[in-house]
């Protein structure tokens, strides 16, 4: 059976993934917000500085402007956002400042943009015209937000890891609790005994939806147990009421035979006894089929069965019968094949398939049984086979193959019982295509 995937593990994994996406999304949002805020602050600072210098020129003249630019360049800002200036004539020749050459910014329209200052240093700049032969540019370095961005990224990395671990841990605890509660219900369905049903049916006053589901499941299983028990009692009573008079009738026929009647009467009495035995066998088969169908999917009472040892014992018993009936019987049994089931029913499954094969294969024919790990049981023969149109019908009650002779014993219940037993053990039984004869395969049901 394939390993079961727990829904609770998937829920925890999804919660961790969503937490990771949430932290990553918040970090990206915070990073972009800081970048846009710093960029807007830089633009505003450049515009304010440029407006201040332009006002100084307008009120105090060019010499005062040059002095003020020199003062600004002498100050080293603590936040790393250094400012740069250039006062130039109309042709762009530098008069004052530290920018070596006039960038491609039009002072006539107060154009702004990024310029390169030195090796690998970018700055946001704005140019303006102060007079017919005088123009000014103010620039401030960008990238001063990088230390802040690194710190924010580090905080999100550490905090996010802690948050994800917390979500995973708490999610695992909550999922484990839910898994335990659901597993109690599953255990009750696997083995619905009274003690387990009573345990899961007990809920406190603060019951939630799972507790309500647990109570409903316990009530449903208890009701099912009562119905199955009532069915068994009724079936046993019906079987007793029918079997008892038949056995009394068989006893009377036995006493009549002991009285020494003539041959014709004795033959009729023997036929009557055969009919009685056939009716009793049919009754028991029908009850077995009904009981197996009623317990389909019920794992209660199943125990590990060594199929290899069980099938070998059955084959050894049939070997003597095959020799007497003139059949060639062979078997191949893999050792160590263990399967959870009821050994009595599994024995009946195998014997029904072998009985069916020996019944329809004429003397001199071959019957072969193969048991492989899985488990997979194959019973095949070289008899007349089964018409393709009847490959499913032969598993119906009272159906007999068109290839069966009129004097072939049986009531058409053997394969129906075999399928009921197989389904009770979560197995499938099918008549597979074969070049000659019939080939029945029993194997574990696949999901």
Image (tube, rainbow, N blue to C red):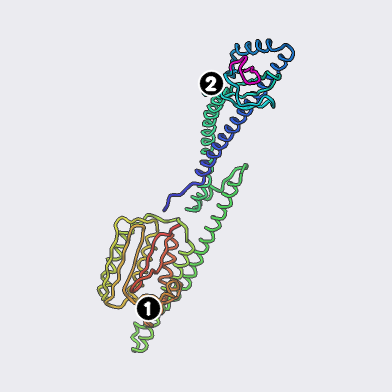
In what element is the residue under mark 2? loop
Q: Quadrant of residue 170?
A: top right
Q: Quadrant of residue 387?
A: bottom left
Query: Magenta residues, as a range?
Result: 85-98
Q: Residues within 10 Å of mark 1 (few under 14, many from 20)?
A: few
Q: Quadrant of residue 64?
A: top right
Q: Is residue 321 left or right of residue 253?
A: left
Residue 193: tell me if it is visible.
yes
Using the image, determine if residue 70 lies above or below residue 275.
above
Q: Which quarter of the figure is the C terminus placed in?
A: bottom left
Instruction: Indicate the position of residue 207 as horizontal and vertical percent values.
Output: 61, 44
Query: In front here: 52 or 174?
Result: 52
3D distance between C-alphas at marks 1 and 2: 107 Å
Who's the residue at 66% across and 23% down the image? 127
Query: In front here: 301 or 142?
Result: 142
Instruction: Indicate the position of residue 159 as horizontal and vertical percent values.
Output: 54, 29
Who's the residue at 33% across and 86% down the image? 260
């Amino acid at each position: 059976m394939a390993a079961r995937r727990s829904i609770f593990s998937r829920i925890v994994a999804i919660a961790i993934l969503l937490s990771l996406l949430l932290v990553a999304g918040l970090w990206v949002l915070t990073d972009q917000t800081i970048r846009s805020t710093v960029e807007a602050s830089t633009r505003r600072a450049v515009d304010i500085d440029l407006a201040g210098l332009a006002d100084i020129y307008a009120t105090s003249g060019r010499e005062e402007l040059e002095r003020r630019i020199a003062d600004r360049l002498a100050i080293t800002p603590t936040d790393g956002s250094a400012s740069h200036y250039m006062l130039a004539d109309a042709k762009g020749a530098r008069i004052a400042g530290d920018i070596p050459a006039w960038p491609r910014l039009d002072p006539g329209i107060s154009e702004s943009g990024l310029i390169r200052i030195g090796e690998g240093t970018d700055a946001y700049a704005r140019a303006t015209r102060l007079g017919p032969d005088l123009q000014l540019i103010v620039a401030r370095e960008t990238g001063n937000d990088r230390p802040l961005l690194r710190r924010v990224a580090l905080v999100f990395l550490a905090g996010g890891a802690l948050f994800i671990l917390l979500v995973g841990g708490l999610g695992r605890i909550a999922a484990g609790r839910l898994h335990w509660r659901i597993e109690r219900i599953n255990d009750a369905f696997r083995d619905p005994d009274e003690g387990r049903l009573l345990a899961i049916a007990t809920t406190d006053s603060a019951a939630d939806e799972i507790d309500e589901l647990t109570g409903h499941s316990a009530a449903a299983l208890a009701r099912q147990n009562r119905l199955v028990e009532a069915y068994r009692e009724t079936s046993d009573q019906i079987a007793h009421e029918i079997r008892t008079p038949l056995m009394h009738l068989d006893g009377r026929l036995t006493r009549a035979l002991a009285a020494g009647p003539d041959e014709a009467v004795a033959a009729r009495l023997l036929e009557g006894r055969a009919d009685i035995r056939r009716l009793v066998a049919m009754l028991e088969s029908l009850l077995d089929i009904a009981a197996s169908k009623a317990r389909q999917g019920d794992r209660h009472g199943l125990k590990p069965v060594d199929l290899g040892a069980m099938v070998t014992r059955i084959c050894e018993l049939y070997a003597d019968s095959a020799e007497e009936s003139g059949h060639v019987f062979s078997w191949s049994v893999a050792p160590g094949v263990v399967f959870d089931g009821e050994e009595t029913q599994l024995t009946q499954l195998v014997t029904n398939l072998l009985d069916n094969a020996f019944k329809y294969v004429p003397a001199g024919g071959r019957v072969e049984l193969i048991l492989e790990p899985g488990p997979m049981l194959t019973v095949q023969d070289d008899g007349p086979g089964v018409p393709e149109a009847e490959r499913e019908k032969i598993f119906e009650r009272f159906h007999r193959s068109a290839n069966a002779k009129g004097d072939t014993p049986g009531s058409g219940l053997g394969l129906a019982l075999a399928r009921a037993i197989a389904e009770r053990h979560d197995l499938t039984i099918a008549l597979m295509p074969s070049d000659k004869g019939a080939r029945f395969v029993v194997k574990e049901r696949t999901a």
